[in-house]
Image (tube, grey):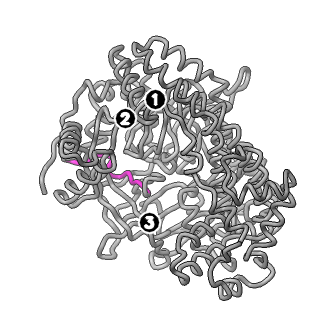
Amino acid sequence: MRKWLITIALGLCILPGARADEGMWLVQCLDKALEKNMKARGCKLSAREIYNEEKGGLSDAIVSLGFYCSGSMISGDGLLITNHHCAYSDVAKLSTPENNLLENGFFALSRADEIPIPGLEFFFLRRVLDVTDEVEALRRELEAAGKPAGSRRLSAVLEKKYQDETGLEAGLQAMWAGEKYYMCLYSKYTDIRLVGAPPVQVAAFGGDEDNWEWPQHKADFALYRIYDTNGEPLHPRRHLKISTRGYKDGSFAMVMGYPGRTQRYISATELDQLINVERPEVNRIRTAQMDIIRKWMDRDPAVRFKYSDNFFSLSNVAELQEGELDCVRRFGVIEKRRAFEAGMPDQELLRRLQEEISGTSAIEKQKVFFREAVFRGLIISRTLMRVGGASKDLSLQKRFLAAGLSETDPRVEKELLEISVRELFQGIDASLLPDFHKGLLERFGDDFGAMAAWIWDNSFLKDFGAVPDSCIVDAFEGVPADDPLFHYVRDINMNLFNAQEKHVGDPQQLHREYVHARYRYLAGLGVPQYPDANSTMRLTYGRVSALRPRDGVYTHWQSTAAGLREKYSSAYDFHYPDAFRDALPPVDFPVNFLTDLDITGGNSGSPVLNARGELIGLAFDGNKESLASNYESVPGYNMCVCVDIRYVLWILRHYAHQDYVLQELGLS
């Protein structure tokens, strides 16, 4: 296999400065200046000990879980730890009404009990190559030949080349909207097995009420094992040492993981449209949908079983986006961005951006109503879309229908439909609607309750819930041509709205030009920069830290088992199993802790490491004051909520009795 060397250009991996604790730094760009700042905060490791392609480094223990979450290796036999909420969907898939592993938890008592989970892909970063010049050369070559030269084509050509040459999975990543390109090369593993996951009322203790809050008391962890292609436990190049010594206020801490997406290079004009025009409508509609789902989940355990995964995803995103709106306004992010942009030399670009957003604002808002009311508004709509897309294959249609009915409840869907029709018809200009929807308006006007009832009662799904799902599927011979629910979902699509847009230019190109202009302006000022998060491996560092969320309010940097007792109640989110209650640690035992680390979605499950690179916890949440961080880090308010590894170990020993895992960790 060919050896690859990386030359790091200091002018491109810009060095940290006064605000070095902010930032999601590319691991391949760690250098002496960043290392110096980290050591000033207390780090005991060199940059080469953290990331080293030739000799290996701490990064070899960090894993991407399909680029949606992060995890880390904690044993030489393939044991991986991440967050429970990263494993939530996997545990839900393994659950049945008779054995609900979400509710009951699951802990294997031997390796033979570990449960395979098909479809998972976990990745280890092996090397990163600077391919900027190669990308630009290929772009020129394709354009000269009159061939497509967009990002998808460039990625397809170069990823295939590097995958063929190295035998590794290849992913081309653009930084700063194409100022820089890196080829990331990974080893991929697909034999993944569930080892342990606590009951959801333990893992997510406090539920939605505590989400994005502090203090929290969650055991947000899960264990997997990775197996190699021979069916043997993987022996990773590196695994983390667990520290049970703890930490204190001000202790150095760092996170390594795969943060998903940030938009810290978004313009003030784009952010204003998102926050003040689109986001309020999204949040309002999703809140109404969640109220219905939550109501039925609380009434019927069968509904909770079917909708828990969907509700978890919906509620997490909804709370995040509502918090983003509040924090962007509270901290004046848009105003600060406009003040910054006033100093940028290319004011003509800013004028064109403003003109583009002004010209498309109304239609973009109507797209929100379509997406939230129809595309995302009904869970059963996904089934109808799949069924419609497989219209030439009756057996496939039946399979999609059976799956969709098994995952939904007619009482919930019927109420969601009423919200859907109300929001759609109140939010969208009637002239943009297809004929079927115009006919509904002519027939029912604004009597949306009657409209929704008629759509449901005249659909082939009208007997859904009254007769067994299997009978509906067996009798299904294709969607009737006049089925109103099918037409309601399928006749309206994004093309109806895209056709109304009047652009002053290519909006994506305008955004790229803005990012390039902002990058070069900051570079000229000598300001440290890191690219927006894009699911590549990053490092962020800081300290264990208390929080002062508002004037006169101070919160401690650690929560303890006392809070598990104080919050316990009959409410679902605060009611853990009796067996867990019997195994609670002492009242002063550490449970969760706060750091000022700069993280975002995708960092979930990332290891929190001490100054020696030892595992002290897992990142699992932020605080509500940090929710502007997708667009701007706010010093003093951006915090990362972590589960203490000692709490994890207590559960493994005293509740799960996973002695074989503790022996494997050398902690028996």
Amino acid type, mark 3: Leu
Q: Nearer the viewer, residue 458 or 434?
A: 434
Q: Nearer the viewer, mark 3 or mark 2?
A: 2
Q: Position of residue 460 (x, y in %)?
A: 73, 77
Residue 59 colored magenta? yes
* Inter-mark Cα distance, 3 to 2: 29 Å
Q: Assign a secondary structure to mark 3.
A: loop
Q: Which residues are magenta?
A: 55-65
Bin the neighbour count of mark 1 within 10 Å (Cα to Cα): few under 14, some 14-19, many 20 and up: many
Bin the neighbour count of mark 2 within 10 Å (Cα to Cα): few under 14, some 14-19, many 20 and up: many
* Inter-mark Cα distance, 3 to 1: 32 Å
Q: Position of residue 412 (x, y in %)?
A: 77, 65
Image point 32% across, 24% down: which residue?
15
Circle on res. 120: 3
* Inter-mark Cα distance, 1 to 2: 9 Å
Q: Assign a secondary structure to mark 1.
A: loop
Residue identified by numbered label 1: 265
Q: Residue 196, relative to residue 496: is it above or below?
A: below
Amino acid type, mark 1: Tyr
Image point 24% across, 43% down: which residue?
52
Bin the neighbour count of mark 3 within 10 Å (Cα to Cα): few under 14, some 14-19, many 20 and up: some
Residue identified by numbered label 2: 177
Q: Is residue 431 left or right of residue 44?
A: right
Q: Which quarter shows the N terminus?
A: bottom left
